[in-house]
Image (tube, helix red, strand yellow):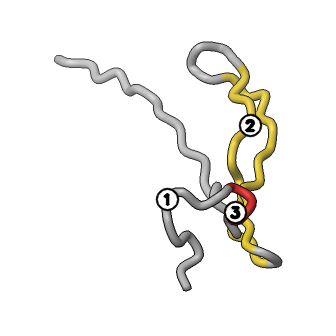
Amino acid sequence: MPLMDRPLVERKAIPFKIAKVWSDKENRYQEPKGYVIFRIKLGNLSATTRVDQWSLSYRHESRI
């Protein structure tokens, strides 16, 4: 039996749970990010979803 059998499964019947943590880190609009997902749980098992943190930065290339 698949864990997610069909698209209309009731929320309480879904075996996966999402763990979130509040982040005050600002987004590009200087607002707090709010809750971010960091872990997925299935019963006693859990998997971390945010191992690395990536950021975008722009490099100015000078032309001669």
Crowding near pointer 1: few (<14 within 10 Å), some, many (20+)? few
Q: Amino acid at mark 1?
A: Pro
Q: Residue at x 70, y 69 (%)?
A: 15
Q: Position of residue 47 (x, y in %)?
A: 69, 69
Q: Amino acid at mark 3?
A: Ile
* Disc nearest the viewer among 1 and 2: 1
Q: On the image, which quarter does residue 46 sit in?
A: bottom right
Disc 2 from disc 3: Cα separation: 14 Å
Q: Residue at x 77, y 54 (%)?
A: 19
Q: Amino acid at mark 2?
A: Tyr
Secondary structure of the residue carrying numbered label 2? strand
Tag 1 residue: 7
Can you say whether 5 is above or below 7 in the image? below
Q: Residue at x 75, y 59 (%)?
A: 12
Tag 3 residue: 40
The image quadrant where one finds the N terminus is bottom right
Disc 1 from disc 3: Cα separation: 19 Å
The residue lying furthest to the bottom in this view is: 1
Q: Position of residue 5 (x, y in %)?
A: 52, 72
Mark drawn on residue 35: 2
The image quadrant where one finds the C terminus is top left
